[in-house]
Image: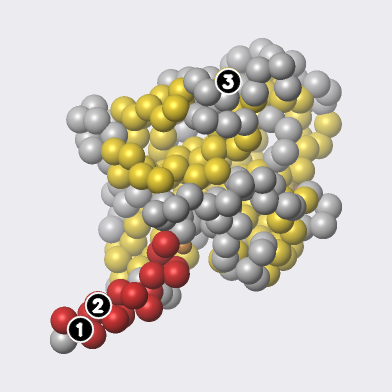
């Protein structure tokens, strides 16, 4: 029996080795002009340029701008996205950027059945864009069931500096939350709908993991420029979906730049 469990664990390993991350990706987080900005919603293993999961229609996709909610669900269009291993279902969305300020994108997906582990995963994801350098909304709490609040302005970190966040569930801090750290190694090609060339390989030893402190805070030193993601796992209030365990995760995407780049 024990042997069987170990074997099952080993067989399940490729599915859990890399970290799943719900992306809301736009190559540029700093915008000069008004206009429609394409966003890609992809459920992927971006650090290892690994498996693309089939994303279902999300429950809600919206953006916060100057305190107001912009519904993006009407812009959703199904696409396929191809990573180094496979092709999966994903979505295009369009963010209408008008006035200067922050645009905080929120994705509320349907629970996804992770067959290798026989659990559902639901990742509430946030990503940040800014027009014209005017900070307006990045500190706002969106009120998601699972959410990471940034304490560092999330769209223009300096590579080599640090990012601090606070893990929240239902509006309360989560002591000791487990957080996976991810890097988009192969940035999506926005027109070809496939992963571009990988800038880095996956780290030896599997997912990068840190823990929040007793008040839900964590800090990570960001070693290089690019798009970094943090996922606090299984922190949301709903623990079951259709008779199976549900992990409600909070994902935040931040952008770092090298100085002088
Ligand atoms: Cu995975």
Q: Earlier in the sequence, mark 1 or mark 3?
A: 1
Which residue position is annotated with label 3? 158
Q: Camera-side residue: 110 or 80? A: 80
Which residue position is annotated with label 1? 3
Residue at 39% in and 54% down = 205
Figure colour scheme: secondary structure
Q: Camera-side residue: 176 or 74? A: 176
Identify the residue at the far front of this view. Answer: 204
Q: Sort mark 1 into few (<14), some (14-19) or many (20+) by Cα contacts within 10 Å.
A: few
Identify the residue at the far top of this view. Answer: 134
Mark 2 lies within 8 Å of ligand 1 (Cβ measured) = no
Contact (CB < 8 A) between labels 2 and 1?
A: yes
The CA span between labels 2 and 1 is 5 Å
Residue 160 in view: yes
> Could you tell me which secondary element the residue under label 1 belongs to?
helix
Q: How many marks?
A: 3
């Amino acid at each position: 029996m024990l042997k069987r469990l170990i074997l099952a664990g080993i067989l399940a390993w490729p599915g859990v080795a890399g970290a799943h991350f719900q992306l809301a990706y736009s190559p540029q987080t700093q915008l000069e002009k008004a206009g429609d900005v394409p966003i890609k919603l992809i459920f992927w293993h971006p650090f290892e340029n690994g498996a693309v999961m089939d994303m279902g229609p999300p429950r809600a996709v919206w953006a916060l701008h100057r305190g107001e909610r912009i519904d993006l669900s009407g812009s959703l269009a199904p696409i396929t996205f191809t990573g180094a291993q496979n092709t999966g279902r994903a979505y295009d969305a369009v963010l209408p950027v008008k006035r200067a300020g922050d645009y905080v994108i929120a994705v509320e997906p349907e629970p996804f059945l992770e067959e290798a582990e026989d659990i559902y995963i639901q990742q509430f994801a946030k990503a940040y864009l800014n027009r014209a350098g005017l900070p307006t909304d990045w500190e706002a709490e969106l009120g998601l069931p699972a959410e990471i609040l940034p304490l560092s302005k999330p769209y223009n970190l300096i590579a080599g500096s640090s990012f601090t966040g606070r893990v929240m569930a239902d509006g309360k801090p989560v002591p000791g939350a487990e957080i996976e750290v991810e890097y988009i190694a192969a940035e999506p090609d926005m027109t070809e709908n496939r992963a571009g060339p990988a800038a880095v390989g996956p780290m030896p030893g599997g997912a990068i993991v840190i823990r929040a402190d007793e008040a839900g805070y964590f800090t990570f030193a960001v070693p290089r420029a690019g798009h970094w993601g943090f996922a606090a796992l299984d922190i949301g209030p709903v623990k079951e979906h259709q008779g199976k365990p549900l992990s409600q995760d909070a994902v935040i995407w931040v952008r770092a730049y090298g100085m002088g780049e």
